[in-house]
């Protein structure tokens, strides 16, 4: 008798195809007005300038500056965001796999890829809210849980580094997340299996 295929695998594959199609269509879409801030900041950083938008930390623009000046730089910028989304889906699956069964972990990654803000985030160059920030948030969460399970000096150092990385991408969103950690540890910092 043939084994019945896992529906979560089919859902994930369908989600990946829909995400890839949505992202591919948007790679060459016109820029929105606020994208130019990131492009100007990235071009300035590439030339050694100091153009800085006050509410936009410089890390994202600094990373974009490596692609600045190329004729297809907008598509490269967007592929850079696409890389972050793919890594986030992979990390989400990996992290949730530790606590959930395979089907639920695949479903979580599929729903992440199907979130409209994620597909939109591939094209928006103004900030890293929907591309790089979720990846760094998941990394921060993974470090916090690991630190709760096995405290160490190196763990605290890595957690502080991830916190700085979060703040380097987006200050306001990161500050809100940091408020959640004291609540997590006040509740005992327990993980559920």
Image (cartoon, helix red, strand yellow):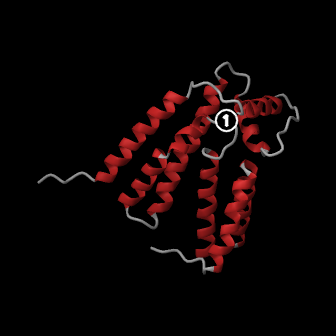
Which residue appears at 63% of the width and 46% of the height?
132
Which residue appears at 60% of the width and 34% of the height?
123
The quadrant the C terminus occupies is bottom left
Answer with left or right where residue 111 lies relative to residue 76. Answer: left
Q: Secondary structure at mark 1?
A: loop
Q: Residues within 10 Å of mark 1 (few under 14, many from 20)?
A: many
Q: Residue furthest left?
A: 1
Residue 112 visible at all: yes
Which residue appears at 70% of the width and 32% of the height?
35
Counting from the top left corner in percent of width and height, residue 26 is at 53, 29
Considering only vertical position in the picture, is 68 above or below 130? above
**How many numbered circles are shown?**
1
Quadrant in the picture for residue 43 = top right
Counting from the top left corner in percent of width and height, residue 148 is at 61, 74
Counting from the top left corner in percent of width and height, residue 177 is at 67, 62
Quadrant in the picture for residue 77 = top right
Answer with left or right where residue 4 lies relative to residue 81. Answer: left
Which residue appears at 67% of the width and 35% of the height?
125
158 and 52: which one is in front?
52
Mark 1 lies on residue: 125
Residue 151 visible at all: no
Quadrant in the picture for residue 14 = top left
Considering only vertical position in the picture, is 58 above or below 172? above
Q: Residue furthest top?
A: 71
The quadrant the N terminus occupies is bottom left
Q: Residue furthest front?
A: 33
């Amino acid at each position: 008798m043939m084994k019945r295929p896992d529906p979560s695998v089919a859902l994930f594959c369908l989600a990946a195809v829909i995400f890839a199609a949505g992202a591919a269509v948007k790679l060459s879409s016109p820029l929105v007005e606020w994208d130019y801030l990131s492009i100007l900041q990235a071009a300035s950083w590439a030339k050694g300038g100091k153009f800085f938008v006050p509410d936009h930390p410089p890390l994202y623009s600094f990373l974009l500056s490596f692609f600045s000046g190329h004729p297809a730089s907008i598509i490269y910028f967007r592929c850079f965001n696409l890389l972050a989304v793919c890594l986030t889906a992979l990390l989400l699956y990996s992290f949730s796999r530790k606590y959930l069964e395979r089907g639920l972990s695949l479903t979580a990654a599929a729903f992440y890829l199907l979130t409209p803000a994620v597909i939109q985030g591939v094209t928006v160059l103004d900030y890293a809210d929907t591309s790089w920030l979720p990846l760094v948030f998941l990394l921060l969460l993974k470090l916090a849980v690991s630190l709760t399970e096995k405290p160490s000096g190196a763990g605290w150092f890595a957690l502080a580094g991830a916190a700085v990385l979060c703040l380097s991408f987006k200050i306001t969103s990161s500050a809100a997340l940091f408020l959640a950690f004291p609540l997590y540890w006040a509740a005992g910092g327990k993980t559920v299996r």
